[in-house]
Image: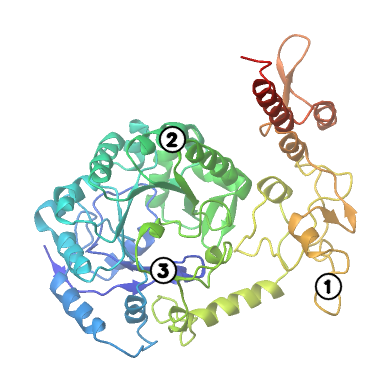
Amino acid sequence: MEKKAWKPSLTSQFYVCPIPFHLDTYRGCVYNCNYCFARDFITFSRRNSEHTSSKFLVANDPESFARWMNKVDKIREYDYEKGNEVAIKERIPLKLGATADPFPPAEATLKTTLRFLRILDYFDYPVEIQTKNPEVLNVYADEFKNPNWTIAVSLITMDEAFNKVCEPNATKPSRRIEAIKRLTDSGKKVMVKLQPSIYPKVVADLPDLVEAVSEAGCWALNTEGLKLRVTMPQSERELFSVIGNHLSLDLFEYYKANGLVTGSDREIRTALKMEYTQLAKKLTGEYGIKYYPADNDILGIGDGCECCGTEVLKDYKIYGNNIRSKAFKPKDYESKELGKCVVNFTRSRKNINLTMDEVVAEKESKKEKEVSPPLRQSDKAEAGILHNIYGGFNEKEPRIVASRGRNPDNPSDRTTGSPTEQRLEPNSEGTTNSLTNVQKDNWLLQNQSIRRLTPTECERLQGFPDGWTKYGLDKSGNQVEISDTQRYKCLGNAVTTNVVTAIGEQWLKALHKDGMLG
């Protein structure tokens, strides 16, 4: 196999990610997943190589890496033009396998990744291992006693037929679960990454998957929605069509009708992401597993900002000046030095000579000045997210959620008007006259009037599941959708179930204590 040397690198994801630092031990990938996140990067790499085969791998050189680590270890003054050196000195966790799996079948004999892990273990360096093939890691995992690792295994479903469609060359889900169990039994810390979460299939798959993950001894799970590039070659469209055909839907049209364009990608809209996010949060809570939503438009939900599972590592730092970190309480291990690094590590030349912190400040300043597009009421009213990093929502410019008397659950009854007309005007001090800070955060006011709650919000206030009153039976016993007016009546005549439950439980305790019940 061909061998070349390349160093770890910071990534352009620093605006959304606390751990923007990665190293591939191989280039190329043999798994050929039909949804591949890194397809654009891999294609770009092959355009600059004489090797175009999807089965061809190039191995990184461990000896060159060892020399580089020894050199960096001796550095005392930071050179902010060399961000990867600063990241090492600051002990930013190193992601192995960001764009190419570190455990292709060939690793069992080549042991390239093994040699990198030995070097990193020598320095007790914090590492996140990302893989679809934990079986190969099991071959030599016992060599490492209490390593500074977190292992993130990609597993999108327990449905083996669906998995074969999405990941034609990867091992079966059942085999991955068995391999995970062997790792956790030996004391290794393993989480599962449900990436991509392919809506709507993910909603049906989550219960079985969370149960399997729990039984395998995993400590955490994350989710992140599928992305479809807005522009892609026909060959790539055909790969996604294979997934859509299995689900009996046109994936492109479905995501076009139910999605949003975010940069160069198309994603399912936030309210629909919240469907699997809330379900995953509920299920992981029941099994005692930590949960991390990794979608960039769902922030402040889950068990922390480190959605890659790095919180189980020791002696490390994160980048705190990003939207995900800011959605949670500040950490005392946020690196101040990393933000001083010059952005010279991306293909784009747009931010050259700016530091990471300066790029973040520029992005935030631009967002404050932009007039955002009209807000989809269901995205904000039902999902309740904190940010949309692509400019859809802006906390410093309060948006209309719904006009008084209108129902944001009804797509045909939404606030109209231009973005400027739907803004509350700031006063000379830059704040709004009509909203307090608390009111700005809860999105209940519009034009100084309190908007009507949606049926979904009323269901939640009464302790019912979402959609509890959406359907009923007609005189013939057929299921029909209930009007919003009737849903309000049903909910208004109901009692708040969790309050009644709490009162009943306290009442029973008192009766037992007084001896009135056995």
Q: Quadrant of residue 110?
A: bottom left
Q: Please, what secondary structure does the residue beneath circle 1 have? A: loop
Q: Report crowding for label 2: few under 14, some 14 to 19, many 20 or more residues within 10 A (C-alpha).
A: few
Q: Position of residue 119 (x, y in %)?
A: 18, 69
User: Disc 3 marks which amino acid?
Assistant: Pro
* Label annotation for residue 20: 3
**Which residue in the protein does label 2 denote?**
245
Q: Earlier in the sequence, mark 2 or mark 3?
A: 3
Residue that badge 1 annotates: 426
| Observer-nearest of 226 and 386 | 386
Q: Marks 1/2: CA distance?
A: 50 Å
Which residue does the image show at 49% across and 71% down from the upper left? 332
Mark 1 and mark 3: Cα distance apart in space:
36 Å
Q: Which of marks 2 and 1 precedes in the sequence?
A: 2
Name the image quarter holding the N terminus.
Answer: bottom left
Kindly identify which numbered label has been placed on residue 157.
none
